[in-house]
Amino acid sequence: MNEALPERDLFGARKNEYILPNADRIVLCQSCGAPMCFVALPSGKKMPLSLRSAETRDGVTYCLPHFADCPQAKEWSTKR
């Protein structure tokens, strides 16, 4: 499988990545079984972060949204 590498800025950050909060509650995706945890957004909504994409730089762990690597992401989309 040939996956495209994520775009990075000059500091090595990936586009749309988030700081991983204390992952005290790890859950599995109901569709693909991947490990993930949730982060609260400024809007108050919660977004799943993929622990598969976890990357530590300078002592801080960053993750991409689980929607980026879940094969069934479109089925869970709730565009309103």
Image (tube, rainbow, N blue to C red):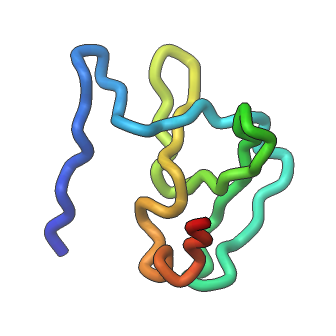
Looking at this view, is 70 or 47 the one in front? 47
Figure disc tally:
0
* Quarter that holds the N terminus: bottom left
Instruction: Tell me if residue 45 comes above or below residue 36 in the rendering.
Output: above
What residue sits 75% from the left and 50% below the top? Answer: 46
Give the image location of residue 34, x and y in percent: 58, 71
Give the image location of residue 62, x and y in percent: 53, 34
Give the image location of residue 79, x and y in percent: 56, 67
Instruction: Tell me if residue 46 comes above or below residue 62 in the rendering.
Output: below
Instruction: Tell me if residue 37 comes above or below residue 44 in the rendering.
Output: below
What residue sits 46% from the left and 22% below the top? Answer: 57
Residue at the front extreme, as displayed:
80
* Quarter that holds the C terminus: bottom right
* Snapshot quadrant of residue 11: top left
What residue sits 43% from the left and 38% below the top? Answer: 16
Give the image location of residue 8, x and y in percent: 25, 31
Q: Is residue 1 left or right of residue 51?
A: left
Q: Is residue 59 left or right of residue 3?
A: right
What residue sits 67% from the left and 52% below the top? Answer: 47
Q: Is residue 8 left or right of residue 72?
A: left
Q: Is residue 10 left or right of residue 13?
A: left
Residue at the right extreme, as displayed:
24
